[in-house]
Amino acid sequence: MKRIIFVFVSLMLTVSLLAGCGGEGAVKSAKVYSDMQFRNEEVADGIVLENNRFILHWNDTYKQVMLTDKQSGKLYSTMPSEAMQVRYDETGMKILNNPQIESPVIVSYYTAESMGDETAYASTDAIGEGAVYTERIEGGIRVTYDFSNLEISVPVEYTIADDRFDITVNPAEVSDNGDNFVTGVAIAPFICGIKNDTEDSYLFLPDGSGALIEPKTIDLIGKQNEFKVYGDDLTVSTFTLTNYERQVCLPVFGSKSGNTAIAGIITSGAEQASFLTNVGSQNVGYSTIYPFFRIKGYANVKQPPRYLSANYEVKLYGKSISDTLLRVSYYFLSGDKANYNGMAEIYRGYLLENNKLVKSDKNETAVNLKILGGVQKKAYTFGIPRTVLYSLTTVAQAQEMSEYFRENTEGEILVELYGFGQSGMNTGKVGGGFKAAKKLGNKKQFSDFTEFCGTNKISLFMNFDIVRFKQSGNGFSTGKDTAKSPNGQTAYLYTFDNVTRNTTGERYMLLARKALAKAAQKAVNAANAYGIPGVGFDLLSHTVYSDYAGADTQVCAGMADTVSEIFSKTKETNEILAHRANDYAAGCADYVIDTPLASSEYHIESVSVPFYSLVFRGYVPMGSESVNLSENWDKAILRCAESGAAPTFTLLYNSDETIVVSEFSSLCGSSYKGIRERIVKSVNDIHRLLARIDGAQITDHRILENKLRVTTFENGVRVAVNYTDEALTFEGNTVGKQSYLILEGI
């Protein structure tokens, strides 16, 4: 009993420390509920505002905002409009809606009693037992949901523009009583809702390349999932190994039902967002996808032994909130545009209009080679352990490999030197020390290789990890230059053993967000010192993380702007290579490789679609995920054909048991000499297609009833891809099993 009391006191002490700290200038508390004075104009039933495209309504009975799209004539609402109709069951009893579908807002809040997150639905806790206050504002209506029993209030603004419907929450206007404090807000959970088992309908989720989810009834509860936009916040420590196939790289989602569709774009606060899906529940009756925004940061603490909780990890929240505006813009499509092709067109247009997508002036490549430098391993001298760098590929060997592919393949080549820093592919100093390991090559060898690439029109890059480090050096300290947790202490990340799935005991840190620009410039200087014209930023391209040392970098806020600024600055002098890039990185990169060409294929997903390629192809040269590291080489090449992406290969020259037993065991299929002939054949085969679609956007993608997939490019070239084990027919042409067919003309 004494031990349990001691553990509880220790944990509560940690809670109090987190609640009282947050980094210099970082404390931005929610408003105090008892101080709130709510304005209320009592907006009546009917039209609030009208423009050339939309009519904005207020339904005072259900306390819902409604919208008529004049273009299609369809009525949209924060609550499914069918659910507003009075219905009776076979016994004559009135059918009551599930509270979820009548909730225009869902609030996540923390209580000291449960020491965890709780959920409050506006339908019951504000509309039912609390209060709702309305106020006309420019462009629309402001609705404040008063969860009076919890002493929480959340104001939401609903406004219309010429082409869209915006929903905005300002976290600085949220109030709570400090005991029940708000940690996150979900916006309009059912505006994209589709009644279960509706024909010709789906939800769109940007998982990996993109995925469609059919709203089919599953069981009473259905399936609920969370997909974090831009991936996990790395500052939040994890103590268990979780496998993720692919991540959400784009803050866009939607739904289609018949000849109408909705495309939702998170236009502010995307770094703090997740997409929540609720699919196939008989109790709810609808399937939906919607954004959830976290406004308060937390640290994960491993549960003490014998602590009375079912959770292995406990969230401990800081005191301050992020006051970044949370905004979702909804666009409405109809007719031939009411599908994921139309959603991609809307999203690409948004990126272009807001200068978030700049067309690259670089030529498309035929093949991309990621050449691995070195890894660290244990060595022993008279029984004394030490760490040495094992050479996977030297610069001279990289040149030999490049010469072979230059002589035997058609089209342009991109080469990235990956893990050539002083610590190889392992985490060491920031940017690998911004110097190549001597064991991998000297200045003369780098100069020879750079000259060879320039003469043979090979785009050459050197990759730098400026996010993770565990050693001081080159102007960066493990003491003062690390990202901080909500308690003001250094955030640590842990490595895991792929077999036991336990932590290895090694840990590393994240570079302070304010130091990223400085590190990027050092990477540019280092590349230039070796005569290498291009800089690769792998982890920076697809990673978000918080830093509670500053007021504007909490809960991952501002990460997109930081990376965009770094890329724009770097492009003034050097070319930029991004890896499986989040939209903000892809939009300003010269090249993107490791492009997601499939979804994670989770159980709720019906089918993958090349949405990512629909958005970016024709604007930035794209390379696939590593073909030789995929689960199926031939299928990966088919995905390249379907998406119009050049194949990428990860290669090393020397391999031994060092790789097999290391954290890089997945690279065992990268031995250059064993697969080079197969690479040449694959590259030359698909170059027949890539040469025909050079620089062309994708204008249409379809999945036919026979499962054949047809991609149409803007120059009229079409490719029909057959992933099945039997030959299929398309317009009188036979597409062989597990193959593709190129067709000219529309």
Image (cartoon, rainbow, N blue to C red):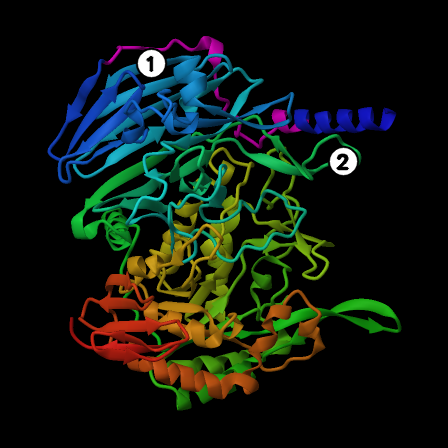
Q: Position of residue 741 (x, y in %)?
A: 29, 78
Q: Residue furthest front?
A: 91
Q: In screen coordinates, is 70 left or right of 338? A: left
10 Å crowding of disc 2: few (<14), some (14-19), many (20+): some
**What's the residue at 64%, 26% (across, down)?**
115
Name the residue type under label 2. Answer: Pro
Q: Position of residue 288 (x, y in %)?
A: 38, 39
Q: Position of residue 651 (x, y in %)?
A: 53, 77
Lower position in the chain sequence, tag 1 or tag 2: 1
Write down the region rendered in magenta. 17-43
Q: Quadrant of the N terminus?
A: top right
Q: Give the overall secondary structure of the magenta segment.
A: loop
Quadrant in the rendering for residue 316: top right
Q: Quadrant of the C terminus?
A: bottom left
Query: What element does badge 1 sit on?
Result: strand
Determine which residue is flagged by label 2: 304
Determine which residue is flagged by label 1: 133
Q: In screen coordinates, is 648 left or right of 16? A: left
Q: In screen coordinates, is 49 left or right of 407? A: left
Q: Are marks 1 and 2 in contact (CB under 8 Å)?
A: no
- Residues 80 and 691: in front is 80
